[in-house]
Image (cartoon, rainbow, N blue to C red):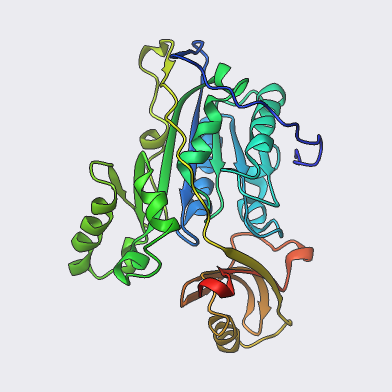
Amino acid sequence: MMSSQDNPPSSLEHKQPAGDVPVTGNSVPALVVSGFLGAGKTTLVRHLLEDAQAQGVRMAVVSNEFGELGIDQALLGSLAEHNYVELEGGCVCCKLSDELVTTLQRIREEVHPDRVVVETSGVALPFDTLLNFWREPVSEWVGECLSAVVVNAEQVAEERDLEGTFEQQVSSADLLILNKLDLVPSDQREQVQERVQCLAPGTPIVPAVHARVSTPVLFPPDPGNQPRQAAKPPTREPHTHEAFEAEECVIEQGIDPETLIQRIQARHALRAKGFVQTSDGLRLVQGVGPRVDLVEPPMKSPEHLLGRLVLIRRSDSQQ
């Protein structure tokens, strides 16, 4: 597996092409997967990796976790062994933008992927991340670019954290995936969709449960294998991040599940994620706002991650 530490990132000059960027017939489609904390981004990426593996397609993934434990990599398991790179210590839409470009180019040279997915952290902005695909030398081989924002339907229904970062993410999406609809009463789903549509008029909305979206929706086949032209890069708009902080919380083995849930809820985290050995067995902790789910993990937890949770919340000054 490649690591972002294998080669130190270089500072690349930001160059935008003056006109359309010619792309060869073997151009590589790229997808930026964004969405607020806990929307279901990693689950979507896992589905895309499974489908790519089944179809014999080489799909490379660059993940930008806000915390530093590497939990997303563990959740993707063996699917991410060879074509997965994780960038830590910042955000790919600003602080790590140069490192993202360097990493993408290294992936191109070492893996020769058929498609590329960049999974941003829950506090990143897809628009600014997408701009990196118009930077040289990445612009020379990347073809169609799409930003898909995963939206937690339950979060919208509860009118929770719908301003600031959430609103900026939704309004800059090319495609919205309205996920977790099964957690919203059927008589409220239309209202939830209308609320999201108001934030991004005209943007397609794909309803989903467990982030299952047909791959051709995100990576449509290239009709006739004709050479494609990349669109003109949009104009960069200045942005500032809300202040978020990530905290690691160590949990003792054998803890009662209800006690664990109460302990997490007491920290008022926007997002909680990790592996814990509870009195009922090994559990993957997935917390989104006040909801904390303890489920059997799809794989065995790496030993170094056991009992360690990442809690993400707004800084004290914004709570």
Q: Is residue 319 above or below residue 100?
A: below
In the rendering, at what x and y percent does residue 97 appear?
62, 38
Q: Is residue 61 above or below residue 18?
A: below
Name the residue at 66% across, 60% down. Answer: 67
Left or right: 70, with 213 as reference point: right
In the rendering, at what x and y percent does residue 227 appear?
44, 10
Name the residue at 60% across, 84% down. Answer: 260
In the rendering, at what x and y percent does residue 261 appear?
55, 83
Residue nearest the observer in this picture, 194 or 46:
194
Q: Quadrant of residue 317?
A: bottom right
Query: Number of numbered discs present?
Result: 0
In the rendering, at what x and y percent does residue 267 appear?
58, 81
Q: Quadrant of residue 152?
A: bottom left
Left or right: 282, with 8 as reference point: left
Name the residue at 65% across, 24% down. Answer: 108
Query: On the rendered image, what quadrant is the N terminus found in?
Result: top right
